[in-house]
Image (spheres, grey):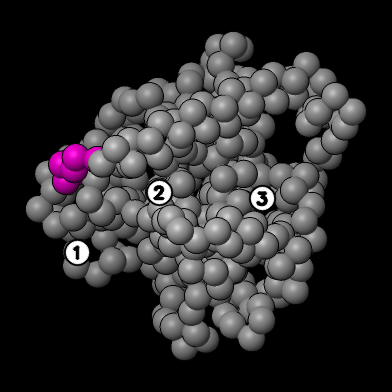
Amino acid sequence: MFCTKCGTKNDNGDEFCGECGAKLKETKTNQVQQIYTSQQVANEPMESLQPSNEGRNTPNVPSKRENKGLLIGVIAAVIVIATGIITMYLLLKTGTRIVTNSSSVVSIKEASFSTPEEAIKHFISSVSANDLYGALTVCAINENAQNYDAKAFINRIENISLNMPAPSQYKFYKAINQSYFLNQIVFQIRNFTYSFSESDAVKSVIGGSPYSTANDVTAADEFVKAVDPNNIKALTVVRIDKPYPEILNEAQAIKNFKIQAKVYGADDGTERVVLYKINGKYYKGGFTLYRYSKNWKIVYLNSVFAGMDISGAAIETTKEDYVNLLK
């Protein structure tokens, strides 16, 4: 069952959404029709590391080893969040500059893209060239942080939680929101880059399951090699399309996109799916984009219409399977 507020897939029989807490309602059985009237309005930056909702409501007593892993994970998450906040504070202090260390200052230039396709092509070209900051020029980090309407968001999902951005009407929270949206998109970019690896370990963690390296002295080295970003330099875009175009173009879907986009100060929104090819294999991925005046920017690396989760990872597919998304 899909949540009609945030688009998250929940187990049949669940009364409340495990993602946003909204009360679940019975909808049409077709997956696309279940979610087309309400787009994804909230993605948790840290939650994107665990794309699956399965087992979220199942009690589980962790082992000592799992507790140790959890502690390490919590510490790592705190470090990541703290680093993001410090980074975005420096971003505010230095204009459009991001200070990555004491000797390196990288400027993120503003760029304009008149169509969703232009924005996506620029993004993919930048990521495949290992140009993170080029990719970030097409992401709606500052736009969302500056314009996020907390009241409209809460009224839309009928829920309040600590997972949502802070009210941007207060100057203090704008820097925090920049960190929120920056972390959100860079985690998705990381997962997107990982997802083209054929490593079992990478596939496991992308799927939301830890990969045990017990008694395997080569596992760490193999993992590091498997996620080398240079591995995706041969990535090519076969085509970019609207998912389920007849439904995407319906009046209700268009209305919902506009409502959702307005929460972040945008005028309109849409989704696209992409067919990739690398090393003789095909992959599919999704994008959610908002239009700010005449400029399209990427918000999420996923498509709710296409049934893709919020991890940002591309999914191995076939041409035939991809074409089914276009019917």
The residues tagged by marks 3 and 1 sit, at their Cα atoms, a distance apart of 31 Å
Q: Amino acid at mark 3?
A: Trp
For residue 126: magenta? no
Direction left: furthest residue: 13
On residue 28, the disc is 1
Question: How busy is the neighbourhood of tag 1: few (under 14 within 10 Å), some, or many (20 plus)?
Answer: few
* Residue range of the region highlighted in magenta in the rendering: 57-62
SS state under label 1: loop
Q: In the rendered structure, which disc, 3 or 2, sits on the residue that comes first in sequence?
A: 2
Main secondary-structure element of the magenta-colored stretch: loop
Mark 3 touches mark 2? (CB < 8 Å): no
- Is residue 68 placed above or below 210 in the rendered structure? above
| Residue located 66% across and 45% down the image | 139
Tag in front: 3 or 2? 2
Q: Nearer the viewer, residue 220 or 19?
A: 220
Q: Amino acid at mark 2?
A: Gln
SS state under label 2: loop
Relative to residue 191, is residue 112 drawn left or right?
right
Relative to residue 296, is residue 243 drawn left or right?
left
Relative to residue 56, is residue 70 drawn left or right?
right
| Residue located 28% across and 29% down the image | 159
Quadrant where the C terminus sits is bottom left
Q: Nearer the viewer, residue 124 or 114?
A: 124
Q: Amino acid at mark 1?
A: Lys
For residue 61: magenta? yes
On residue 296, the disc is 3
**How far across and down, in percent of the image, does residue 84 sit?**
63, 28
